[in-house]
Image (tube, grey):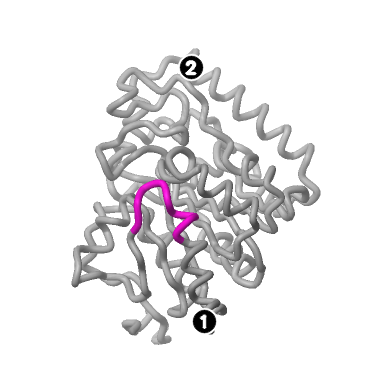
Amino acid sequence: MTTPRTTAAGERSDLFITPGHLACPGCGATLAMQWVLSVLGKDTVLGLPACCFSIISGAFPHTPMNVNLVHTAFETGAALATGLKAGLEATGRGDAHVVSWVGDGGTFDIGLQALSGAAERNEDIIYVCYDNEAYMNTGNQRSSATPRFARTTTSPTGETMHKKDIMAIMAAHGIPYAAGASISHPDDLIAKVERAKDIRGTRFLHILVACPTGWRMPSDMTITAARLAVESGIFPLIEIEDGERTTVNYLPEEKIPVSEYLAVQGRFSGISEDDIADLQRWVDEKWERLLKTADVAGP
């Protein structure tokens, strides 16, 4: 059962994650969850492997979630979604949306094998990776989504590797739809969920969700940090159809220096000018390659 709320304009809308949840102040993942479910609606079943949302969703029998959800093991997000979809189809509820809601650790690392298998089979599921760029639920350990030079509890002097290109990996599977989105651009995010909703097969949504706790910044900087990631080109907003046709959905009027993005986060404290320059070159090279291969560049 959904809980109605009244918007500032007096219109009714559905609140799919209610106040009183257990997220940290400023958590970007809760915004992403609300916006995704606002499109998919109450006829949605969430699969939750071990991640921040295992805690945010509360302890039985209490939950802030107004959709059905199933908890599962860390590595089994896509496998669970596959089974849930098969079960729903067998019981005549095949039209229900099955969403695997997984953090970057459970996507880039621990659950990549199950995700790859589901993508290869083109399972009819929506897989959402909400990416806060580390294992935040267990104390901010680095994942392969952690950016180079970011400090975590297991990379205290700064991560040495660049972030894994998960979008390229998913595109290589030839799935019908993959998209990168950010909580800083909700209209773009919602439009991509709308597109994914009407496509059959494996759909992959990679959503950047800034984490004030792990990124070491004030809780009111969540949207700002996510927006700076997009404006600097570190996190482009793109779509990839059938593993081939790439669309850049947002082109900054003028890309801001990467240093502006790094400066608002304590996890990059102490980074040298040489390291900033190295990261800027890496971002610029990736951005240029993206624009050369994209079929369409959005406004």
Q: Splitting the image into 4 quarters, where does residue 190 fall?
A: bottom right
Name the residue rendered at 66%, 68% in the picture: 200
Please name the predominant secondary structure of the magenta segment in the image.
Answer: helix
Distance of label 2 from label 1 (alpha carbons): 52 Å
Say which residue label 2 marks: 275
Q: Which numbered disc, 2 or 1, marks the residue closer to the eye?
A: 1
Q: Secondary structure at mark 2?
A: helix
Whether residue 19 sits left or right of residue 155 in the image: it is left
Residue 266 makes an appearance in the image: yes
* Mark carried by residue 11: none
Viewport quadrant of the N terminus: bottom left
Going by the numbered disc 2, the residue's amino acid type is Asp
Q: Is residue 296 above or below residue 148?
A: below
Could you classify mark 1 by the number of other residues whose Cα lies within 10 Å: few (under 14), some (14-19), or many (20 or more)? few
Q: Secondary structure at mark 1?
A: loop
Going by the numbered disc 1, the residue's amino acid type is Arg
Q: Earlier in the sequence, mark 2 or mark 1?
A: 1
Whether residue 147 sits left or right of residue 137 in the image: it is right
Name the residue rendered at 44%, 54% in the picture: 77
Whether residue 121 sits left or right of residue 56 in the image: it is right
Q: Splitting the image into 4 quarters, where does residue 143 fall?
A: top left
Q: Which residues are magenta?
A: 72-80
Residue 5 makes an appearance in the image: no
Estimate the x, y position of residue 211 in percent, counting from the top left.
34, 45
Estimate the x, y position of residue 231 in percent, counting from the top left.
56, 42
Magenta stretch containing residue 132, yes or no? no
Residue in front for this viewpoint, 56 or 209 = 56
Q: Is residue 26 above or below residue 125?
A: above
Say which residue label 1 marks: 93
